[in-house]
Image: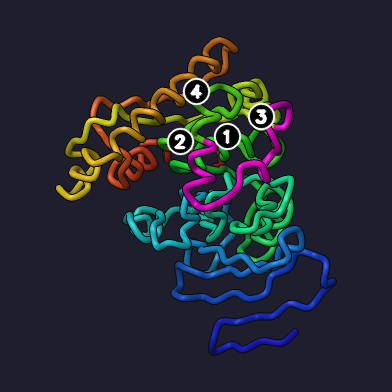
C-alpha cells in the first residue's frame, strides 16, 4: 500500500478491472471525500461522506443529487445545512458526485455528451462494499433522491431490494411508463444534452422495467417516504430570491412532481403498501422545500436503518 498521510490519501492496489478505493481524503473529523474507481464506467467517482469522528460502525444513507449531478455546484452539500443536520447522528451519509442527466441507471449505449452511464451497477454493486469496508458501514442502507433522482431512487430500491431498508423521493417524478413520467424523463435527459435514445431505447419494455409505479410491489416491507408540494411559493422555500424563482418556473416543475408523486402514492395504496406521502400546500422546486422534507423523513429512515 502506498500512503500519503499528510494528504489523507491511501491508494489501494488491486485488479485493474475491479471496483476499488483510489483515495480517502479526510477533510475534517466528520467529513471525507471517498474516490472510487468504477470498472463499469471506467472512471473515478468522487463521493462526499459525512460520518462521526473516528468513523465508528454505522448504517449508510445514500443521497443522490439532482439533474446536474452535483457537478454544477448545486447539491445537498452546497445548498443546505446538511452537515449541521447530521452532526452527531450515527449514520454515514454518502453523496455521490456525478451522473448529470443520467437518471442514475444503466444506459444501453454510451452517449456522445453524457458519456458512459452505469449508475445502477455502481450504486448497487460497486460502491456499497467499499463504503462498508472503508467507512465502517454496517451493511444496512437507505437511499433517497431529489428532483431528477427521486424516481430513480425508488427504481434502485426495486432493482436491488436486498440492499435498502428505506427509500425516499423528494419532489421527484416517479414513473417512466406513463405519459407524464415519460415526458419528464425526456426533459431531464435532453436538458443536459443527452440523447434519450441511448438510455433504454424507444419507449417499451426497457422503460417499463424501470418504472417505480409499475414495480411498486417490490417495495413492500420497506419504509417509503414521498414528498412534493403544490408549486405555489411560500415561506418554506426560504429566501425571497428562491420564492421568485418559484414564480419564474420552479413552481411549474414542482406542480408536475406532485402529480407524479401522487400517482406513485395511489399505486402503493392500491397494493396495500404502507408509506408516507407529504403533499404540501405551499412550496416550489426549491432547496428550502427539499431540506424541510428531508428533515421530515429522517425519523422514519433512522428507525428503519437503526441510526
Residues packed near mark 3 inside 10 Å, few (<14), some (14 to 19) or many (20 plus)? some
Separation (CA) of disc 4 from disc 2: 16 Å
Give SS at disc 2: loop
Image quadrant where one finds the N terminus: bottom right
- Given this view, does label 4 or label 1 mark the residue nearer the observer? 1
Q: Nearer the viewer, mark 2 or mark 3?
A: 3
Residue at the image position 73 percent from the left and 68 percent from the top? 20
Bounds of the magenta span? 185-206
Whether tag 4 and tag 1 are in contact, CB under 8 A, the answer is no
Q: Pick the residue in front: 197 or 123.
A: 197
What element does badge 4 sit on?
A: loop
| First reached walking from the N terminus: tag 4 or tag 2 | 2
Q: Which residue is identified by label 3?
A: 203
Looking at the rendered image, the disc whose residue lies closer to the viewer, 4 or 2, is: 2
Q: In this rendering, which labeled residue sits more in front, label 3 or label 4?
A: 3
How far from the left and from the top, in percent, is residue 124?
A: 69, 48
Residue at far left of view = 240
Residue position marked by numbered label 1 in the rendering: 154
Disc nearer the start of the sequence (4/1): 1
Residue named by callout 2? 172
Instruction: Tell whether label 3 touches label 2 (CB within 8 Å).
Output: no
In the figure, is residue 80 to the left or right of 204? left
Amino acid at each position: 500500500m502506498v500512503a500519503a498521510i499528510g494528504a489523507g490519501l491511501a491508494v489501494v492496489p488491486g485488479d485493474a478491472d475491479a471496483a476499488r478505493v483510489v483515495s480517502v481524503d479526510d477533510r475534517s473529523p466528520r467529513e471525507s471525500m471517498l474516490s472510487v474507481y468504477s470498472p463499469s464506467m471506467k472512471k473515478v467517482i468522487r463521493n462526499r461522506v459525512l460520518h462521526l469522528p473516528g468513523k465508528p460502525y454505522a448504517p449508510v444513507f445514500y443521497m443522490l443529487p439532482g439533474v446536474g449531478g452535483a457537478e454544477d455546484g448545486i447539491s445537498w452539500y452546497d445548498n443546505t445545512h446538511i452537515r449541521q443536520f447530521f452532526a452527531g447522528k450515527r449514520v454515514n451519509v454518502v453523496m455521490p458526485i456525478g451522473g448529470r442527466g443520467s437518471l442514475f441507471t444503466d444506459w444501453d449505449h454510451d452517449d456522445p455528451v453524457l458519456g458512459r452511464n452505469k449508475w445502477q451497477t455502481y450504486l448497487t454493486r460497486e460502491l456499497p462494499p467499499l463504503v462498508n469496508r472503508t467507512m465502517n458501514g454496517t451493511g444496512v442502507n437507505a437511499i433517497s433522491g431529489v428532483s431528477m433522482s427521486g424516481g430513480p431512487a425508488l427504481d434502485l430500491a426495486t432493482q436491488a431490494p436486498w440492499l435498502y431498508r428505506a427509500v425516499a423521493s423528494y419532489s421527484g417524478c416517479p414513473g417512466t411508463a406513463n405519459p407524464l413520467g415519460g415526458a419528464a424523463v425526456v426533459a431531464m435527459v435532453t436538458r443536459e444534452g443527452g440523447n434519450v435514445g441511448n438510455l433504454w431505447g424507444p419507449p417499451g419494455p426497457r422503460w417499463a422495467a424501470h418504472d417505480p409505479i409499475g414495480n411498486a410491489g417490490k417495495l413492500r416491507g420497506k419504509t417509503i417516504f414521498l414528498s412534493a408540494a403544490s408549486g405555489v411559493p411560500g415561506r418554506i422555500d426560504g429566501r425571497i430570491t428562491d420564492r421568485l424563482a418559484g414564480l419564474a418556473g420552479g413552481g411549474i416543475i414542482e406542480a408536475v412532481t406532485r402529480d407524479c408523486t401522487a400517482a406513485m402514492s395511489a399505486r402503493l395504496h392500491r397494493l396495500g403498501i404502507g408509506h408516507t406521502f407529504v403533499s404540501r400546500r405551499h412550496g416550489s422546486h426549491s432547496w428550502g422545500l427539499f431540506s424541510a422534507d428531508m428533515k421530515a423523513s429522517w425519523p422514519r429512515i433512522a428507525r428503519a436503518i437503526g441510526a
